[in-house]
Image: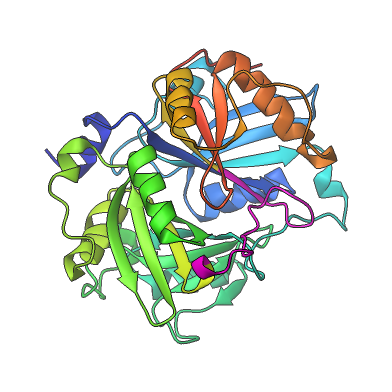
Amino acid sequence: MSLVEEFKNGDFPDCTWQQANIRVKDKEKSLAFYRDVMGMTLIDTYDFPKWEFSLFFLATLPPGEEYSLEPGSDEAHKYLWSMNGTCIELTYNYGTEKNEDFHYHPGNQEKDGFGHFAFSCNNVYDACEILEKSGISFKKKPDEGRMKGLAFVHDPDQYWMEIIKMGSKADKKQKLEHVPNKAYHFAQTMLRIKDPEKSIPFYTEKLDMTLVDERHFSDFSLYFLATLPKSVQSRIPDPKSEKASEFVRSKLYTAAVPVLELTHNHGTEKDENFVHYNGNAEPRRGFGHIGFLVSDVYKTCESFEKEGLKFHKKPDEGGIKGYGPLDYTIYIKHLILLHCLRVAFLLDPDGYWIELVGRGRDVNLV
């Protein structure tokens, strides 16, 4: 059985990473970027005219998979809330595109938690030539800076998108058109963490992720985690070995399996007052949360509560307390999902919001 087949039909743990959420100003520009430039598939949409916001879910389909469902249909909803893969969720509030002065905070300033999304391809230089000709702006081109062979481009809201290599590190002559399915695969969501001794056990022991690679440098460390079928978990390389990086590049990225990249700047864990901004408060509102599917939200939250984990919202909590004016969209989404999908928001050790959604629950939210 191929790795793609294992991810499609494998025996997964109860918690599976299903989404990463950002807020966007102009839905048309953002959809054009993620769908038309980065090759993602729009798998589902929700529109709430009464509350003036919309949700768009895009994913890189596994190689060889075709998607024929109509976004917004019951069939697409069922696919979304039972998928084994990970999507990007775009939250759009009506009218923001008409305000020239309005913008979301893309991260990457002092103490910001969210860093970037990443897309893999098998020739970064060819990809960047195509992106530049398409009018995409760059934060860093492949041969600029200390780290050669990777690039950063901006999406329409100025969020950073890293362009990295998939496949064997030594395979530099492969042409872009040889990538299975589409040119780019959604590959990473990067968050900064204060203390890996707290964050790594949280994601591996509580949310069933697997540490697949770790890299240590003089002043920072990188930890890469993924949701893996149990059959794959049993045969991954040692995360500290060179084979681990090769496994991520040549196996996971090629199969369109993204990783959660946790970046630790050494010494932050020693500062009691140090905190990362989680993207959900002004003036740094932009990144929203990452989300996981679970079989039973109530049982999962009951277990987490007994273990002393903290929540932003428990499954049956309502009310608008704690929400600012621009949080109204999130509040309504929570309220709707509470009654349809049974959703909660857990807090990780850095205060990032972790959405927990019931797998395969009632799907028609409108």
At 57% from the left edge and 47% from the top edge, which residue is drawn? Answer: 352
Q: Give the residues in magenta.
A: 269-289
At 80% from the left edge and 41% from the top edge, which residue is drawn? Answer: 326
Q: Quadrant of residue 232?
A: top left
The answer to whether residue 189 is magenta is no
At 51% from the left edge and 62% from the top edge, which residue is drawn? Answer: 194
Lateral position of residue 233 relative to residue 89, left or right: left
The C terminus lies in quadrant: top right
Can the viewer see residue 254 in this picture? no
**Residue 208 placed where, x, y %?**
33, 39
**Residue 327 placed where, x, y %?**
76, 38
- Give the dominant element type of the magenta stretch: helix, strand or loop: loop
Q: Is residue 228 above or below residue 269?
A: above
* Front-lying residue, 142 or 103: 103
* Front-lying residue, 206 or 142: 206
Count of labels in the image: 0
Q: Is residue 334 above or below residue 278?
A: above
